[in-house]
Image (spheres, rainbow, N blue to C red):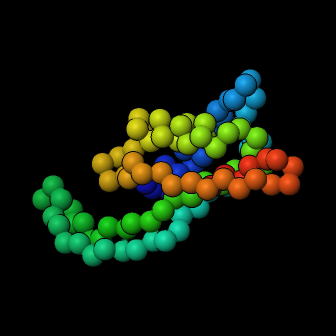
């Protein structure tokens, strides 16, 4: 998933609603990539291009605080990925949900 796809998914989640309200304020969403690795490759593409390497990494979206159930956020992300994921995007989604003192979730 490219960084622009992560930003697009983040925007999709920021515009999603639960019980008539957004999942969280726009400022409570953050996204980044981590755990990257480069795999060298050598492949000619369309006769005039070259694939020099593949870049593998995890895209992370954080919502803090979030009062929507973590399972609902996972469903929103899963549906988006099924409709917008590319050939090389993983369909496996990992997440964590920690409960804050005010009973809000911190979701990643």
Q: Is residue 68 above or below residue 20?
A: below
Left or right? Give the position of 66 relative to 82.
Answer: right
Against 10, is 60 above or below? below
Residue 29: where, in percent of width, then height? 70, 50
Quadrant occupied by the N terminus: bottom left
Q: Is residue 89 left or right of residue 68?
A: left
- Tell which residue pokes out farthest to the top in this image: 20
Residue 64 seen in the current view: no
Query: Residue 43 occupies which quadrant of the picture?
Result: bottom left
Q: Nearer the viewer, residue 26 or 66?
A: 66
Q: Quadrant of residue 60?
A: bottom right
Whole-percent x and y of residue 87?
30, 48
Quarter-of-image position of residue 56: bottom left
Q: Residue at x 73, y 33 (%)?
A: 22
Task: Identify the residue shown where x is 19% and y is 72%.
Answer: 42
Query: What residue is rendered at 82% in x and 47% in y?
Result: 103
Residue lying furthest right in this view? 102
> Where does the C terminus fall, quadrant-wise?
bottom right
In the visual, does 53 lie left or right of 77? left
Residue at left 56%, top 54%? 95
| Residue 100 locus on image (x, y percent) | 80, 54
On the image, the x and y values in percent for residue 30 come to: 67, 55
Pick out the residue farthest to the left: 47
Q: Nearer the viewer, residue 1 or 35?
A: 35
**Can I make out residue 63 in this image?**
yes
The number of discs equals 0
């Amino acid at each position: 998933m490219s960084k622009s796809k992560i930003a697009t998914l983040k925007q999709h989640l920021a515009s999603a609603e639960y019980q008539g309200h957004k999942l969280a304020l726009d400022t409570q969403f953050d996204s980044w990539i981590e755990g990257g690795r480069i795999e060298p490759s050598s492949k000619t593409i369309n006769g005039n291009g070259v694939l020099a390497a593949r870049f593998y990494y995890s895209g992370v979206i954080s919502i803090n605080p979030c009062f929507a159930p973590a399972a609902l956020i996972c469903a929103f992300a899963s549906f988006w990925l099924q409709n917008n994921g590319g050939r090389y995007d993983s369909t496996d989604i990992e997440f964590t949900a920690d409960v804050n003192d005010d009973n809000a979730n911190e979701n990643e």
